[in-house]
Image (cartoon, rainbow, N blue to C red):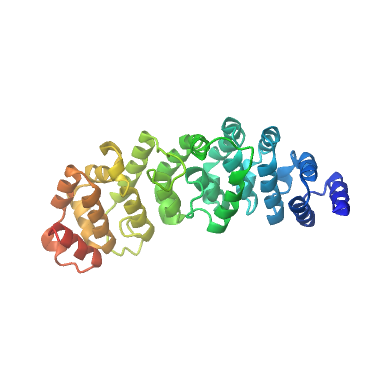
Amino acid sequence: MKHLDEIIGAVNEKETLRLSILHKLMLDFFENCDEEKKTNLLDSLKDKIPEFIHTPDGAKLAIKLIWFAPVKERKLIVKNFKDLSVKAAMEHYGHRVLLALFDTIDDTVLLNKVVVSELANDMKKLIEDEWGEKVIHYLVHPRDGRGIDKQEIAFLAEGDSNPHSKKTQKDRYGQLYAGITENLYPYLAANFEELVFEANKSNFVGACLETTSKFDLFDRQVPSEARKSCNAAIVEIAKKDFVPMDQEGFHIIEHPAGGFVLNGIMRCDVDLPEDERLSVALVDGLTKQQLGSWIACNKGCHVLLKMLKVGGPKVVEKVKAAINRKHLDNYKSKGAIVLKSFLDGK
């Protein structure tokens, strides 16, 4: 251990921090040394963490240093991510370090100023990136198995017992989420069709527009006007003529991801005021003929059924009026069968 301590000190002085072998040595050292040596290693690395998070061992070491660091050192660690947050978010291993910062740092004002604001200002680049999307997803839904795998969640949870984090998860995550809402939702509304159809970000989009559930770690509230803008974007996409099995591109009602998103968002309608409900936006924005045409496909029938189940009296009245029962009886899809059963009160 003594020789390892000397080697790490010497190599560190030679500014070769990007070497993966050094990351392995430092991680092994940190995991096996006493508190004093941990503190010494932290002191030598606290202003250099962004330089070695590009390898699995380097990222793991950085995370463990963040958990170990007292409040003062944590502030310095955060400040050293200035102008490097987007780069870190788009790294295979580096993005995990940002998640650890979100979990650990109590000074959310500083974290929003240095890290989250940089991420918010590069929303398009991050959401289009495999790792960047995970970081934004985490700010919306921390510890969500749809965004990161269970093993990673379990590892991050190891840091929850660190002695220096005092703020509740509810407060910390809520304050960080507030730092991205102003940029996130306008981006979603402006790029909804591309995200759902081309980028295959249906899980991400659905997660951003969900209401708070018992599984959430904080009370996530989508700003009212932001939700209305996203609903309006969906309505514009849904207005397009529905041609079943269109070879030039599926309508949102028939597209696998589109139907998933519609049902997922509408599931939350029961928890929302009427003017924020997607089901209301759809019946207000689409004609009777447009809504009624959806019975021609299985997914369309399921969406109409969801509207009947979650919608208020106005939605139910308009959906029933749009469904031509004689035409519906001619369809044999599973969706058509369950829709008919529901209409018949079975």
Total number of numbered discs in the rendering: 0
**Residue toward you, 5 or 188:** 5
What residue sits 23% from the left and 57% below the top?
294
Q: Position of residue 158 (x, y in %)?
A: 60, 50
| x 67%, y 36%: residue | 74
Q: Residue furthest top?
A: 109
State the image quarter where residue 49 is shown: top right
Which quadrant of the figure contains the N terminus?
bottom right
Query: Along the horizontal axis of the image, is 306 left or right of 61?
Result: left
Q: Is residue 5 left or right of residue 267?
A: right
Q: Residue at x 17, y 42 (%)?
A: 314
Compared to 187, does 344 lie above or below? below
Query: Looking at the figure, which quarter contains the C terminus?
Result: bottom left
In the image: residue 46, left or right of residue 334: right
Q: Residue at x 55, y 41 (%)?
A: 122
Question: Is 237 located above or below residue 175 in the figure?
Answer: below
Q: Position of residue 209 (x, y in %)?
A: 39, 45
Nearest the viewer among 333 and 6 is 6
